[in-house]
Image (cartoon, rainbow, N blue to C red):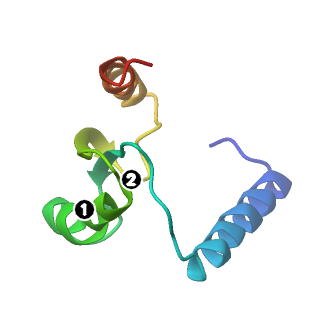
């Protein structure tokens, strides 16, 4: 990542803040459609993550949700190795939604 010690401290603060925000998050409402992109999760199997953690979000979608398997792992999805493929997949989903 080529982070200085100061930038690493800042990154750790941001990551910690995101975790704290998520602890009390209680989603509500709905959107017209949900598109979920998923990679190898931080823990457990991909199918377990998809079926038990991601698919329940379909309850917040008024339309049929889309679940797209993308290359890489959760924390490597935006690495140089995976970005070109993810970009193509992401654009195709945007186009499919007319965006």
Q: In the figure, 64 relative to 13: above or below? A: above
Residue at the extreme bottom: 24
In the image: residue 10, left or right of residue 2: right
Secondary structure at badge 2 equals: loop
- Residue under the point 30% across and 43% down: 72
Q: Determine the CA span between mark 2 and mark 1.
A: 17 Å
Q: Quadrant of the N terminus?
A: top right
Please give the residue where the numbered disc 2 appears in the rendered image.
74
Task: Name the mark nearer the viewer: 2 or 1.
Answer: 1
Residue at the extreme left: 47
Which quadrant would residue 59 be assigned to in this image?
bottom left
Please give the residue where the numbered disc 1 appears in the rendered image.
55
Residue 88: x %, y % from top left: 34, 19
Q: Closer to the N terminus: mark 2 or mark 1? A: 1
In the image: residue 28, left or right of residue 14: left
In terms of depth relative to the viewer, which is nearer, 32 or 66?
32
């Amino acid at each position: 990542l080529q982070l200085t010690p100061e930038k690493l401290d800042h990154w750790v603060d941001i990551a910690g803040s995101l975790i704290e925000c998520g602890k009390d998050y209680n989603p509500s409402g709905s959107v017209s459609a949900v598109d979920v992109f998923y990679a190898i999760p931080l823990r457990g199997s991909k199918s377990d993550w998809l079926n038990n953690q991601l698919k329940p979000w379909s309850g917040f979608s008024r339309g049929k949700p889309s679940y797209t398997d993308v290359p890489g792992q959760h924390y490597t999805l935006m690495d140089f190795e995976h970005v070109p493929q993810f970009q193509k997949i992401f654009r195709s989903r945007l186009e499919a939604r007319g965006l």
